[in-house]
Image: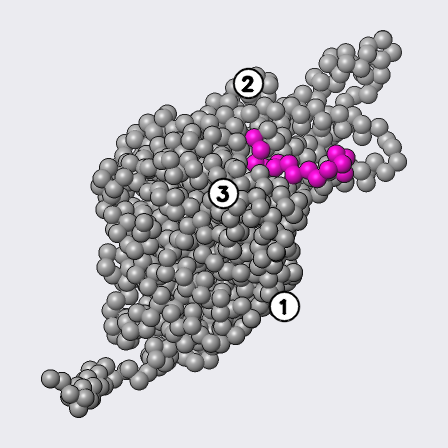
Amino acid sequence: MAAATALRANPDRNFRYWLLTPAIFLLLLVGLFPLFYSLIVSFMRIDMMDTDTSFAGLYNYANLFSDKRLWAALGHTLLITVIALPIELLLGLAMAYLFLEKMPGRQIFISLLVLPTIISPIVAGATWRLLFDNRFGPINQVLGWFAGYPVTALWTLNPKLVYPAIIFCEIWQWTPFMFLILLAALSNVDKSQTEAASIDGAGFFRTFRRIVLPAIWPVMAIAILIRGLDLVRIFDIIWALTAGGPGTMTETISVYTYSQGFKQFETSYTAAIAFLVIVILTVVVVWAIRRMGLAK
Amino acid sequence: MVTRRDLGKIGLAAGFAGTFTRPAWAESAADIAVKAAQQYRGQTITIVWEAGLQSLDPLNFSGPKWKELTGIDVKVVEVPVAEMFTKIMQDFRSGAGAYDALNVIPAWMPDLVNAGALEVLDPFVDKYNYRDELQKIAPTYRDNQMMVNGKIYGFPDDGDVFVMYYRTDVLGDPALQAAYKEKFGTDLPVPPTNWKDFDQVGQFITEFTDGKPYGAAFFRESGYGNFMFQERFRNEGGKFFDGDTMKATINSDAGVKVLTDWVAENKWAPPGVEQWGFVENLAAFLQGQTAMTISWPPYGRWAASYGTDQEVMSWVPKSTIAGKVGYAMTPGGHPELAAGFCLSVSSASKNKEAAYLFIQWLNSESVSLERVKLPYALRDPFRDSHFTDPGYAALWPEAKDYLKALQDGANNGLLDLSLLQTDKYEEVLRQSVSKLWAGEDPKAILDTAAGEWDAITEKIGVDKQKAVYADWASKSGAYPKM
């Protein structure tokens, strides 16, 4: 009785829930439904080449453990991440420090520096493929000028060159992202504290470790997390540069998943791979958030 | 005793019988298709076609002409070749029926038929009297690329075959020939007909001319390398599988020899050849930087500068070797019928009859002849009449020799491997080729590849795949007749 009275007193209380319903429905439809549907598919035997769509139980998940190519792809992903991420962070930080102080043309330089970030990664990859081309690419040509003889380095085929080429492209495109975020964070550090430290005789590294880093850490941690996740799902640049080759030497987990799903048509197995990646990422992200102190 | 008079009577009777039982003899397949299609005036049919130059045929020529003759609009869906199979399967599986007619690579046919994505064409062929004209398609294509399990699912529509191109001025240079004879004690073979001679001549040219031009260059990029491997492996006597056990045998001595020879050839081929695909190889040959190469038929037309003055062909480097190119079958005498296209009707189409009539018209003797002569399109001669057409033979001075090489290739060509889920097997080959260029050992590469092939076969089902392989291997173009 009291509740009915309360509702009558607030006639718009249910109305606002009705207003939210379409948005919630849409979110469920495009977010949760595909997720659950993929989960169901991962327990079936669907591939686009066969009419058998029977229940497969844990068959696809069991296959994940014996799939050497999958684990190799995870290894390649990890390798790129652990090399590219620290370099992007350090370069981004160095660049942010460089542009912290006012200087002539600062805004123009910053605008030019962030240009790579706004290019679509697949376009960047295709452009770098042309630049690395052994016959017509300018990189070999320039190297040839210095060497004094024609250079025909196979940047996307030679095992010794292919990872440096990929990582270089990745760093070129995404270091500006780190730079921008860290520049914003550094700009907000209380200058009176750093000046006081300087007067007290603290050197650059000590000031950075004791004052600047704690101040920018929440922002830096978010940047590391975002870029880390980006690197784990790296696809475009690799697809455009090497398509995972030579052989499967540069195949990352995203490239492998795409290949299984859209080239080999292993629909159910691809769904199982996707869930494995979700589980791994969830564990890593939860661990990282706790470790970085972002969950406070 | 049968007299001349009796023969005349028999002939007359046969003529009458023919007239009454097949009154349409007087009409060509193209005319029949046009007449029947007019009932669908105002409708639109959608056809999947390879994006790029290939699709200029229906966009600029056949589509508008069909519209003019029948009142049927043709909507061309351009799809890159690497995505065509996926798009066709997705359309079929979803039941959308967005495509009526299809361009299908013959090696995909078992998979598409197994899935039920292609319409059986036999009833239409009989209804519209197309069987006679179908028989005039060159035997290799007709007998090997048209049917699955004895039923017609596609009309072979593109005479894709590898051809060896060589510079007649370089190989015919008296100084080079004399030096060759002095070094090897034999005449320089023009052109080389086996790989031993080809490699010897190629290396000699590179050394003699100091790389101006290089002896030869090849497709080495893995996507093309797959075709090159399939051809050369079989010319070396290799078999893909043991027909009894379905165990892969690509790691045999023949396979290892092919990969080992490739690595050796790269040492006298242009630097960086490991990454060369269609365009790189084309540019080098047309610019006179290589003396021999192997590729699809368009190289021959473009080397003769046929059609390259058109704006859409502006990306093709200007030929510096027109009039200096000889055409021959690839070393070993059994060139790969690499890729190719068939015209099919989608089983999900809501307009099957109109779609069928369009592909019959496209594929008919008269219309296909016009299409293979389009300078900007990439359809290559595939009918007996194309190879002997005086109009085609007059397109450039050496066109008659070119057509002869294409016909010889068609008569002796080797089919692409075609099994259930062929692309999975080919993907392993593609990866093997790129592993080779990364410096891995040929034997180790092929042992791994054979293991991966076995795993694919086991997943599909050994007996199921064995039956498909037996059907493919029984075809005349599966393996060379040694």
- The answer to if A152 sits in the magenta stretch is yes
Q: Find out whether the residues at labels 3 and 1 contact each other: C-beta distance under 8 Å.
A: no
Of helix, strand and loop, which one carries label 2?
A: helix
User: What's the magenta region?
Assistant: A145-159
Circle 1 crowding by C-alpha within 10 Å: few under 14, some 14–19, many from 20: some
The amino acid type found where label 2 is placed reads Arg
Disc number placed over residue A290 in the picture, else none: 2
Identify the residue at the far left of this view.
Answer: B1
Disc number placed over residue B309 in the picture, else none: 1
Nearer-the-camera pick, B435 or B30: B435
State the image coordinates of residue B411 (x, y, percent, origin top left): 36, 61
User: What secondary structure predominates along the stretch shown in magenta?
Assistant: loop
Place residue A271 in its image quadrant.
top left
* Residue at mark 1 to residue at mark 2: CA–CA distance: 66 Å
The residue at 64%/36% (across/down) is: A153
Is residue A226 visible in the rendered image? The answer is no
